[in-house]
Amino acid sequence: MAEKTAQITTEPAVALPERFTGLVRFSDWIVSTEAGRIERRLTVEMAACREFYDAMMVELDDIITYLRTRPGADPSPQDQALLNLVFSLHEVAQAVEIYDQGAVVDGADVRLFTSVLERGPVGGTNG
Amino acid sequence: MGPFLCTTSDVPEGGRKSVQPESLPELVVCNVAGTFYVLAATCSHGEASLAAGRLLGCELECPLHAGRFDVTTGGATRRPAKKPVETYQCVEQDGGLYLTDAASSAASASQAA
Amino acid sequence: MTEVKERINPPLDAPDAAEEQYRWNRRYPELGTGPITTDRFLSEEHFERERKLVFGKSWLNIGSVHDFSGNGSFFVRDIAVLDVSLLVVQDEQGTVRAFHNVCSHRGNKLVWEKSGPCPYLFACRFHGWGYKQDGALASVPDEGEFHFGSDDKNPGKDGLGMVPVRTEVWKGFIFVNLDASGTDSLAEHLGPLGESLKDFPFDALELRHRYDVSDEANWKVILDAQNEIYHLPMLAPLHRFLGGGAFATNEDGYTRLLDFERLGLHTVFTSDSDIEWVDTPMRTAVAKAHPDGGLTTLPIRGPFVFHVLFPNMVLGFLGDFMFTYNVWPESVDKSVWEIRMHFPRPDTLADRVIHDLMKVRFRDLLCEDVTGHAALQVGLKSRARDVFVVGDQEVQIRSFHQNLDEYMERGNRG
């Protein structure tokens, strides 16, 4: 699997809110698109996924408590980075809690399911 | 002490084994980190022997529909299984594994039912 | 949002009533108990009849106002099964109109972009004929060389606008009807289903995700597979897991419909949730993101609600999350499954966490389904059996096929 990690796009580093700077060691998981988060879930070794999952689950209560104080619209870049980190956790939780691997067991390639709204103009063109 | 089930070396850590003591239902012995657990082998959902399924940590998975049971309690942990399976106390003596007397009579009662 | 914040449907308890055997057959004996033919998923002839008598005549949902970027914008909708391309425009005043996306000059496909703000005029790439947002032909280069209105055979310039298609908007959902001679209104088509949702606060929800998934199956295979929950505790790992939670099961672990109703051409079924079920650590932690624990605040009939809008649309609710499907046939054994996910506007950023986890899980669930659809098509295609059977807990499928047959029969006569 290691050679596949080359497909992962590295994004420019974005700072997390100050109280969560301890999570900066997971900054590779701050990914702004669904396609990018899926790609990491599918290509990062399960051991690293578990490490991320275990560490994030410990922090999650604090993160949620913090996010509950932040208005729902127009997040700051730091808050958006924190959200993107949690969104990556959602992908990884599927791998850790349900499938015991990144890919969907007995399912299609989850890459088929990346929101077309992330891909620029959308029409009603089938296929 | 109740009937003999198997030798402890028959069930290595992480393993499970089907046993069929006389006049009792089929049972399955599981070894989770050195502790032995005995359950009724027939899945509470479909007609299948859990002894043919995978032992994942302390969960035993049915080979038919992939329902799962916690071997320490018998409780169903994954659908489609919902009802628990019976669990039985066992004791270890001189490398052998035996049902306790109470477990033995419970298992006979369940066989009769 | 405030008017829907009060929780209207607390989780209900186990489906005691659902244990009556053949409950749905007793309610709808006219649906019978017979098998369903394999041929209807495979035959080109059947597909042609559907093309002509169903897709060619029925109101079809082609998207929603969320697909526009605002007033004065457009999107193009190609409908493969009807061999049409439509230009759908929301004008500066907010009125939605659909036209055949065809230039009146030589029949060129007019707009090639997928969507965007309306240009000054929709200009044909071939010779530059330009049309206004209301479809009127406004500009013809070298106009003097044309014979507009010179005799009966030559329409005037005012008769050469884009050809309009019957278009109506219901609750933000855009419907078209390609039967130019048809007279039934969208309200008549929606009938009791439209009535049952007339007070639903669709405005409280916004489109967040859309997946257009290529699916190697007949369009009805996809609809049928989605239109029952018997498979939930069995199909694949996430189905088995969630099958215990959002979908109550009886003592034996089998799902039971909480309710099922035929609403004219359409149907709705509901499922209860299982209050004893223990969710994953992830979902349990995220539940704290909202004072209600992410429970339903919208006025829906049950924890899971699934409407099939004849012929090819699904409108469903799972808690505060609304999903729609549009299943578009491409050929008899190939379809595009268009999936949209809508959520309430987030009060806090923690709501976005709840929404994203719901999205990820629902998406993976459908990812398991796609493989199931293709496998169904392979099996049916072998024609190992001429018919297959459906149980009482799959009554929705029986109803759909009966509606389809009756609709085509009426279309044939009419």
Image: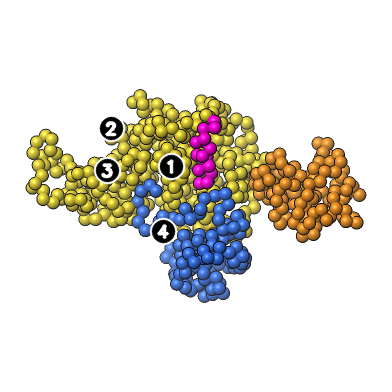
Task: Look at the image and give the colour of chain A.
Answer: blue
Q: Element under label 4?
A: helix
Looking at the image, which residue is at 46% across and 43% down?
C216
Eye-nearest disc, 2 or 1: 1
Asked if both marks, 1 and 4, belong to the same chain, the answer given is no
Q: Which residue is mark 1?
A: C334
Which label number is shown at residue C181? 2
Which label number is shown at residue C9? none
Q: Which residue is mark 4?
A: A118
Q: Quadrant of the N terminus of chain C?
A: bottom left
Which three-letter amino acid code belongs to the residue tagged 1? Lys
Q: Decide: is B91 above or below A18.
A: above
Which three-letter amino acid code belongs to the residue tagged 2? Ser
Which three-letter amino acid code belongs to the residue tagged 4? Glu
Eye-nearest disc, 2 or 4: 4
Main SS category, magenta section: helix
Looking at the image, which residue is at 58% across and 33% down?
C391
Estimate the x, y position of residue C51 in percent, counting from the top left.
37, 35
* Upstream in sequence: badge 2 or badge 1: 2
Horizontal arrangement in the rendering, residue B20 relative to residue A95 (left or right): right
Estimate the x, y position of residue C196 in percent, counting from the top left.
45, 39
Q: Are the residues tagged 2 and 4 within 8 Å (C-beta)?
A: no
**Span highlighted in magenta in the image:** C370-385
Q: Which residue is mark 3?
A: C100
